[in-house]
């Protein structure tokens, strides 16, 4: 069983920054790929950023490339998402998800249904 808890969300003006964190409660954390997803009202959950179980591979959705940075600390069982130059369209609930690293992705890193575990989410609101 994996328990994930996100933190760090809040309200910020456009152009500002936020740093999200996700802590995991699981014995074999280093076996899991981790992803950040977001979901705006009325929209599907979409992948934002990904880091593999070893931390050697990262991926980003096109809208956030160059602005967001994902990182992980296996010793602390945490991942972070540094979000800079925030835009109005970044407003959403942000979730971290865990995918067991030894099972294949069926639709790439950004397919939400490939992730078995989710946190409760943290709200990010960007205003003008």
Image: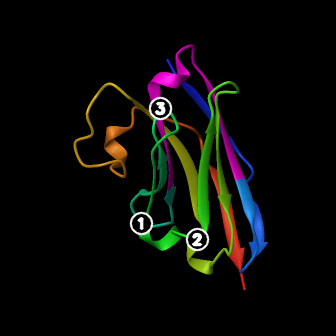
- Packing grade of label 3 (10 A; few <14, some 14-19, many >=20) is many
- Packing grade of label 1 (10 A; few <14, some 14-19, many >=20) is few
Of the two numbered discs 3 and 1 in the rendering, the one whose residue sits closer to the viewer: 3
Residue 30: image x %, image y %?
52, 24
Residue 107 vertical position relative to residue 103 in the rendered view, above or below: below
Indicate the quadrant where residue 126 lies.
bottom right
State the scheme by which the image is colored: rainbow
Taking depth in this image into account, of 31 and 1 the one nearest to the observer is: 31
Residue 23: image x %, image y %?
66, 33
Sooner in the amino-acid sequence: mark 3 or mark 2: 3
Spatial CA span between label 3 and label 2: 26 Å
Residue 108: image x %, image y %?
29, 49
Of the two numbered discs 1 and 2 in the rendering, the one whose residue sits closer to the viewer: 2
Q: Secondary structure at mark 3?
A: loop
Asked whether residue 23 is drawn in magenta, I would say yes
Per the image, the residue denoted by label 3 is 53
Per the image, the residue denoted by label 1 is 43
Q: What residue is at 76 percent from the left and 60 percent from the top?
A: 10
**Which numbered marker is on residue 90?**
2
Taking depth in this image into account, of 92 and 100 the one nearest to the observer is: 100
Highlighted range, magenta: 20-37
**In screen coordinates, is 52 left or right of 91?**
left
- Packing grade of label 2 (10 A; few <14, some 14-19, many >=20) is many
Main SS type for the magenta part? strand
Sooner in the amino-acid sequence: mark 1 or mark 2: 1
Q: What residue is at 38 percent from the left and 29 percent from the top?
A: 101
Indicate the quadrant where residue 18 lies.
bottom right
**In screen coordinates, is 104 left or right of 68?**
left
Residue 105: image x %, image y %?
27, 39
Spatial CA span between label 1 and label 2: 13 Å
């Amino acid at each position: 069983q994996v328990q994930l808890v996100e933190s760090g969300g809040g309200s910020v003006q456009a152009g500002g920054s936020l740093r999200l964190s996700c802590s995991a409660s699981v014995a074999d954390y280093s076996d899991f790929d981790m992803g950040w997803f977001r979901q705006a009202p009325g929209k599907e959950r979409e992948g934002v950023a990904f880091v593999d179980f070893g931390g050697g591979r990262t991926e980003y959705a096109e809208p956030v490339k160059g602005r967001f940075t994902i990182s992980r600390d296996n010793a602390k069982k945490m991942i972070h998402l540094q979000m800079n130059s925030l835009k109005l369209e970044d407003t959403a609930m942000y979730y971290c998800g865990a995918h067991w690293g030894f099972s294949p992705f069926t639709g790439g890193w950004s397919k939400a249904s490939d992730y078995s575990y989710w946190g409760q989410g943290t709200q990010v609101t960007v205003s003008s």
